[in-house]
Amino acid sequence: MTKRFGSTVAVDGLSFKATPGRVLGFLGPNGAGKTTTLRTLLGLTLPTSGSAMVDSRPYRELEDPVKVVGAVLEGPQFHPGRTGRNHLRVLASAAGLPTSRVDEMLRLVELNGSGARRVKGYSLGMRQRLSLAGALLGDPRALVLDEPANGLDPQGIRWLRDFLRAQAAGGRTVLVSSHVLAEMAQTVDEVVVISRGKLVAQGSLDELTHGVEAPIWVRSPEPERLRTALAARESVQAEPGEAEEGWLAVRGASLEDVGNTAAENGIPVYELYRPRQSLEHVFLELTAGTEAGG
Amino acid sequence: MIRLICAELLKIRTIRTFWGITAGAVGLVLLIVVLSLWLDDSLGTETDVRDLLSVAGFSGLLALVLGVVVGAGEYRHGTIAWTLLVTPQRLRAVSAQALACGIAGMVIGLTAFLLATAVAIPWLSAKDAPLPSLGELVELIAGVVAYAGLAAALGAGLGGLLRNQVAGVVIVLVGLFVVDPTLAALDESVAGFTLSGLGAAISGADDDSSALLEPVVAGLVWGLYALLFVTLAAFSTAKRDI
């Protein structure tokens, strides 16, 4: 799918798929085209070329979209003078859902005590919860959430994470964009990373976090001897660590290689590990050098 | 479609604007009726009384403003995205909104007329003024209600097309109070086709002008105007990124 706004290419030949039972994280720097992509998927924005499909059909052709996809848009907007409950009643009425479903959703997002208040008195977090309640009204098979954690307090974020995990465990498809990478790392199964509207990486969280080679760190009282011994091995590079004395950063070798080399040469080793790359690190590596493009 | 119209009606009646405009329309009409009854001693003929009751047609002006505010308000408040997530078929969504506004406008017109009549009839009876027949009352009420409904539907189309409440209301007011009188002054044959002329013809207001169309014809012309604006709004919404 490609989307242009005038001469600006917001999304450039992007293609990916979200599967049932998995939480797919949609990552990218600001202006990478995440929101445009999700709004196109939801039929709010028209693609310049290509298509975005839900259940193999464009959103606009869905018979009963509320029961297929629940959506939370970034910075959800409401009529400030309408109460939260009435906002949901309007949606339920248009979708042919009973009012009892409205009260059920208000309880689910813990807004049942505030449903009679006008939305202009809601905090950002409360608006986000109301938006989530709207997305869940039709008990949809898929959820498309654009920055759903915005404005939520730590308890709310925890609740959202557990909720999304439960939704995926129940067989639903969950597509979620967020800039809170640490939170995403705890929530998602798979990741799609885009930058300047283009796909940069796609895969499971494990694949991605192990895809960027991380050095092995080893601490020894004889770092120079160990470094010489390791350098003698083919394609192994060992550099002194900058932070503390005694540390070496080793690339091109496995943990076993480093341990065996030290043992064979009678060099004591105090610490030896390969840190797992954080999603943030992977994200920054993948999007390094790119700029906000639209 | 009925489901969508019901949802749009719920949307309209759950904002204060609707109640404020309804109260404004009723208050304005009652004020004019009461002042006329109090200060005007010349209500001596059935035509005078009929003219007095047709003042309820002023509610059409406020119904027109309501339509603009509701149609453009979807964009001002960003609620259009919610509307289109539930009803992605944009032509249906815009049509349902225009029809709902039309119904809301009819409610405003009906309320204004009934209250004006409830005040005027006993007062006129006490003054021994000639009262309109039941048939004339039905004709009047049909005109006022139809005008308010058609006005609100046209307003919704204009609001959806412009997407800006202030611009929409200003355009309506300038059109009614500047453009229409100017056109009528320049060419009387055009007067019957201006919004003011059509409104007066539909609601039964007598402005002593022979240029006015027959009420039913005027209603059809206004209906065509409304259909034009709603269609333009629908197609423009269908092609637009939200």
Image (cartoon, rainbow, N blue to C red):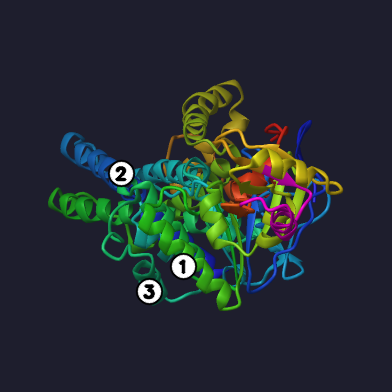
Secondary structure category for the residue under label 2: helix
Letter of the chain that mark 1 sits on in the rendering? A
State whether discs 2 and 3 lie on one chain: no
Instruction: Assess disc 2: are there few (<14), some (14-19) or many (≥20) residues with their C-alpha within 10 Å of its C-alpha.
Output: many
Magenta residues span: A249-268
Task: Name the residue type under label 1.
Answer: Asp
Q: What is the secondary structure assignment of the residue under circle 3? A: helix
A20 magenta-colored: no
Circle 2 is placed at which residue position? B52
* Proximity of marks 1 and 3: CB atoms separated by less than 8 Å: no
Name the residue located 22 percent from the left edge and 50 percent from the top edge. Answer: B120
The chain containing the residue under callout 3 comes to A
In terms of sequence position, does the residue under pointer 1 or pointer 3 come before the other? 3
The vertical placement of A232 against B93, above or below, is above
**Residue at screen point 63% across, 45% down:** A281
Q: Residue A276 appears at what percent x and percent y?
A: 62, 54
Alpha carbon distance from label 1 to label 2: 66 Å
Q: Residue A162 — which label?
A: 1
Q: Nearer the viewer, residue A1 or A231?
A: A231
Instruction: Determine which residue is flagged by label 3.
Output: A104
Residue A107 to residue A256: above or below: below
- Does residue A260 belong to the magenta stretch? yes
Q: CA distance from mark 2 to mark 3?
A: 52 Å
Tell me if mark 1 has few (under 14), some (14-19) or many (20+) residues whose alpha carbon lies within 10 angstroms of its own: some
